[in-house]
Image (cartoon, helix red, strand yellow):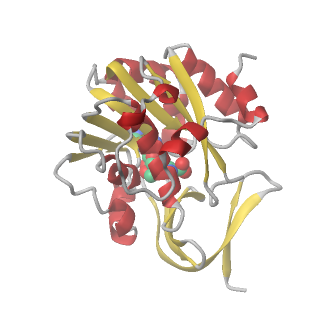
Amino acid sequence: MGLWFTEKQTDNFGITMKINRTYHSEQTDFQKLDMVETEEWGNMLLLDDMVMTTEKDEFVYHEMVAHVPLFTHPNPKHVLVVGGGDGGVIREILKHPSVEKAVLVDIDGKVIEFSKKYLPTIAGKLEDPRVDVQVADGFLHIAESEKAYDVIMVDSTEPVGPAVNLFTKGFYSGIANALKDDGIFVAQTDNPWFKADLIQQVFQDVAEIFPVTRLYTANIPTYPSGLWTFTLGSKIHDPLKVKEERFTEMETKYYTKALHFASFVLPKFVEDLTKKQ
Ligand code: SAM
């Protein structure tokens, strides 16, 4: 049978896959980190026994975090990633020629170190001269930044451990201050099957701060339930009103111009989460 890993979403449901071997396992200062080889999904990073990324399906998440806000903004130059130590979002950001500087702030240097070693196709652009990698708490970085960024992406773990603060209204207010006057931010906001309350709360909090607030989804097979949400807050630019000419040619595997708009079309039970209770 070999060794199987299960990420438990509840006591009664989980997502299971076969593990060929473990490359590295340790308790860092912040979380339990495992880097493993799976039979089906290639190398995989786990934090606190939750799937963070796999070589086979990582492109969905990383493209959807990066390209939706970056194509919505007319001229993104300065971009911040909070979390994202595996480097996948940075790789996608650098595909945009307007980007002059991409700052990555992950609290855990071990995630960066082991992603470079075992996930080179994902982390391979972290050494690019346009990238400034900082090992620090993203919450504090946001609190200390003022009108510094065109786009901010929150590529965090779930709201446990070091990421708890990254799902608070205070953090979203800080993001609004850290963004320029026409800035945009996006955060991964988990799945609507098991985390409906979280999505609803985040959407309401963001909507009280940002004039344009939108929810979009992507299909990510190795994340619990497969249906993943992203919450976007914007001061001016609306992702649903991006003009045709803004979409330039880019090599992607999931994101397309049509999908940009389609990802905002929500199943009814998900759309309901964006309505006030
Ligand atoms: N794509 C994944 C998902 O949705 O499951 C998450 C990617 S993982 C690289 C998220 C990263 O957020 C981790 O490397 C973790 O160290 C980082 N993180 C958690 N809390 C943080 C904080 N307060 N400041 C900065 N980074 C944080």
Q: How many marks?
A: 0
Image spot of residue 97 (x, y percent): 24, 44
Q: Is residue 11 left or right of residue 76?
A: right
Q: Is residue 58 left or right of residue 136?
A: right
The residue lying toward the viewer, choosing from 180 and 25, is 180
- Measured along the vertical axis of the image, is residue 88 above or below residue 22? above
Image spot of residue 2 (x, y percent): 67, 85
Query: Residue at (60%, 59%) from the top-left corner?
Result: 49
Quarter assignment of residue 277: top right
Image spot of residue 203 (x, y percent): 61, 25
Residue at the far front: name it.
244
Image spot of residue 246 (x, y percent): 36, 35
Residue at the far bottom: name it.
1
Query: Residue at (46%, 51%) from the top-left corner?
Result: 62
Q: Quadrant of the N terminus?
A: bottom right
Quarter assignment of residue 221: bottom right
Q: Is residue 221 left or right of residue 98?
A: right
- Measured along the vertical axis of the image, is residue 74 above or below residue 212? below
Q: Is residue 230 left or right of residue 146?
A: right
Query: Residue at (28%, 24%) from the top-left corner?
Result: 145
